Image (cartoon, grey):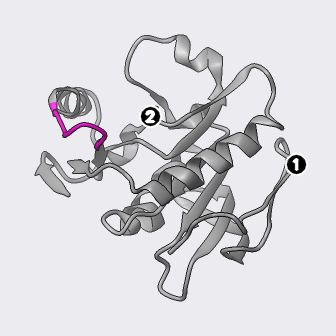
Amino acid sequence: MSALTVEHGPADGQEWDDLVRIWEQTDGPEGSKVEIIEGIVTVSPPPANNHNSIADLTQRRLYTVIPEEWGIYQTLGAAVPSRSGLYIPDLVVAPRAVLHEPGNYIPAAAAELIVEITSPSDAGHDRISKPAGYAQAGVPLYLLVDGHAPGGPTVTLYGEPTGDVYRVHTAVKAGEDIRLPEPFELTLETADFPLD
């Protein structure tokens, strides 16, 4: 992963605009993710095949329960300017109407659910920086599929954001089912997730 330091701390006004401009002008290799994490523009390598398979399986299951006017997006930016963050989650569930605005990202607050699947290069961001941003934005549910957790692969659903902290709603070992509450009402089977 490479990084370009721009500014630490929350960006507002012109600082945020400058940060987004640098983000938009950063060319990463084909398939890589360019994000802003805590004021730093980062480039992550393309996800591994297992990572993509988990995203696909999760997306297919979510499509069976979401309203017709919502979509599930794999390359949609979610902005949290108050934390100097513009993340590219593995999956964003959001109303299609929020994508009618011009640009390359949406406010993270518009998401109903965000899913992150850890990779060795960015697991720390998925466990600490990003959930703090998503919680601060008020994203109601955050699902973390952590194949690189220190105690072994886990799947954790966070909810009830307060400030920049989530409450752990449910945590299971990979391979066990996890229940997503309203508005999803879905039991997500993780037995076939190809976790290392």
Residue 185 got which mark? 1
Q: Are the two marked residues, 1 and 2, in contact with CB atoms closer than 8 angstroms?
A: no
Position in image of residue 195 (x %, y %): 55, 70
Report the front residue among 170 and 90. 90
Residue 189: within the magenta? no
Position in image of residue 102 (x %, y %): 42, 11
Dividing the picture into quadrants, the one containing residue 27 is: top left
Residue at image location 75% in from the left, 45% down from the top = 61
Per the rendered image, the range of residues in magenta is 26-33
Q: Earlier in the sequence, mark 1 or mark 2?
A: 2
Q: On the rendered structure, is 60 left or right of 119? A: right
**Against 108, is 121 above or below?**
below
What is the C-alpha distance between the residues marked 1 and 2? 25 Å
Position in image of residue 25 (x %, y %): 16, 27
Residue at image location 68% in from the left, 62% down from the top = 157
Q: Which residue in the structure is indicated by mark 2?
A: 75
